[in-house]
Image: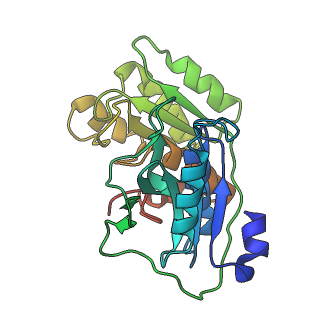
Amino acid sequence: MDLIDKNYSNYDGFLVTCGTNTMAYVSSALSFALGDIGKPVVFTGAQIPAEVINTDAHNNFVNALRVAIMDIAGVFVVFGSKIILGCRAKKVNESALEAFDVFNDTPFGEIMIKIRINRKNYNHRCNKKLVVKNGFDDNIACFTLIPGLKPECLIKLIDHNVKGLILRAFGSGDVPYDLFPALKYARKKKVPVLITTQCPRGATVMGINEPGRKALEFGVIQVFDMSMEAMSTKLMWALAHKVPYSKMKKFIQTNLVGEIKD
């Protein structure tokens, strides 16, 4: 990020090679930190090492370079045949060459004989000054809810000064009643609690069932259609930039770079 900031005026675009396991987290983080950037920043990588004869590194690198010189602006992941917004990318397969997919959205574009952009409205290159808002507080924890999880597990984390929690709840965002004391304690300690669904697809809609509706009364924040990568890095970013607890819900649920549908 510092290299992009330092060299921003020297180049028309930036290509970043990255390990595939954390690429979606890094591209999400830079999406927030680089904000309304006026040039393309393109992430890519490979499933097969570059020195292996059948590597996918060459094609991914060349296609990412093609995207990096286009008249677009923002953070993207180019992998296989897809162009994905950085805040919507998710690794979905550990071995397939089409390892990345779009989470709860459609691809920004596709790699074909000619590159096809699927959006009618998108950000174009511009000469605006780059404003980098770096900084992430990674003192957060994520729990996948399972039957029998005790509220004490969450309360102890809060007592050890964790600054934010993400709960992967059941269905559309249902939290067992047994965990309500932990949600109440988090509100008392002003620790934001984000609620997402465990389902591979779909959004968090907590007003459907009573456990979800009741959980909302304790101030939890439903993240709607955000990916885990986007919501976790957005929470880290918000904490580092001192977004107060009273404004955290509105901040998390506000679309900044395409991570959540308006």
Picture quarter with the C terminus: bottom left
Q: Position of residue 187 (x, y in %)?
A: 51, 40
Q: Provide residue 195's location: percent of width, then percent of height.
A: 42, 38
Q: Residue furthest left?
A: 208
- Viewed as shown, does residue 3 lie left or right of 43? right
Query: Is residue 248 at least partly visible in the picture?
Result: no
* Residue at the extreme bottom: 127
> Taking 197 as reference, is 223 above or below it?
below
Near-viewer residue (145 or 85): 85
In this view, the residue in front, 214 or 134, is 134
Extreme residue toward the front, this view: 53
Image quarter of residue 114? bottom left
From the top left corner, tell me how far across and down residue 196 is, in percent.
40, 38
Is residue 131 among what the camera can see?
A: yes
- Report the side of 29 relative to 200 (left or right): right
Specify the quadrant of the image occupied by residue 51: top right
Q: Residue at x 44, y 60 (%)?
A: 250
Residue 46 versus residue 160 in the image, above or below? below
Q: Nearer the viewer, residue 173 or 4?
A: 4
* Nearest the eye: 127 or 58: 58
What residue is shown at x 78% (from left), y 66% (from top)?
A: 3
- Residue positioned 56% across, 74% down in the render: 69
List x then y, in percent, for residue 20.
Answer: 59, 40
Indicate the quadrant containing the N terminus: top left, top right, bottom left or bottom right. Answer: bottom right
